[in-house]
Image: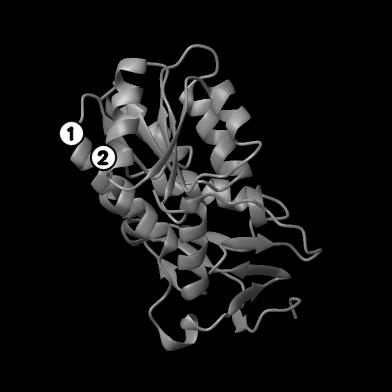
Amino acid sequence: MTDDAPKILLVDDEATLREPLADYLGGQGFSVTQAISAAAARSELTTWQPDIVLLDVMMPGEDGLSLCRHLVETRGLPVIFLTAKGEAMDRILGLELGADDYVVKPFEPRELVARIRTVLRRVDRTPASPEAMEDWHYQFEGWVLDPLKRKLTDAHGVTVPISTAEFRLLRAFLDSPRQVMDRDLLLDLVQGRTAQLFDRAVDNQVSRLRRKIEADTSNPQLILTVRGGGYRFAADVKRAAPGPAA
């Protein structure tokens, strides 16, 4: 296993699934650490940070949904849910919490590997335009977003953690300021393959992002709702070399 192998935290209380899956993923070139519970996962995360988390939903003690909320809100880690529940409402809730994808048990391990690699590519993907290939930062209303590090800082230089989905949503707004963006487009940008299944997913992601960047979420000034149309980012945005916000 090479030092640059993608690091996976596999959280599942079912040893008969977890251990063979960890072996399989290791054979596919990943570095896998196992955790039998949310508490064990939190303990592992005190000493290292994985590139992605595979997370069972139903576990004794703290469930996967609660742990997912913690992961995306405090660490911005990409999460794929492993769930025995196939109902749409369970999938919706997981995606609304900021998960990047889900697979329903029983699943084909090769499909899971494909999903993992897709999410990792999406997280690591850098813009193709010549301008964006430079180390430009977005600046708006005192905020600064570093797209390469996926780091958001406020006017006081304090880092505000954002999930993968929140980052992609904010990036979409910053690339098209003052333009109306309909829900279908935003869903595709934020959730990719699963977007078309969940019409309200983008509304929940917008609400979560507003809680991060709006001074008053009851009277948003940056992300405006356009009746019947979607959303519009109302602030001026500029790209600048790394440094304090202008």
Rounded to the nearest angstrom, the CA distance separating label 2 from label 1 is 7 Å
Residue reaching furthest to the right: 156
Residue drawn at x 58%, y 70% is: 234
Element type at mark 2: helix
Residue ID for mark 1: 108
Residue 222 can be seen, yes or no:
yes
- Of 101 and 10, the residue lying toward us: 10
| Image quarter (top left, top right, bottom left or bottom right) of the C terminus | bottom right
Residue drawn at x 30%, y 30% is: 21
In the picture, residue 43 is in which quadrant? top right
Mark number, residue 112: 2
- Pointer 2: residues within 10 angstroms few (<14), some, or many (20+)? some
Q: In x, y percent, where is residue 176?
A: 46, 74
Q: In x, y percent, where is residue 163?
A: 53, 49
Vertical comparison of 9 with 189: above or below: above
Disc 1 residue type?
Glu
Is the Cβ of the residue at disc 2 closer than 8 Å to that at disc 1? Answer: yes
Vertical comparison of 231 with 119: above or below: below
Element type at mark 1: loop
Vertical comparison of 233 with 26: above or below: below
Disc 2 residue type?
Leu
Mark number, residue 18: none
Q: In x, y percent, where is residue 70?
A: 59, 35
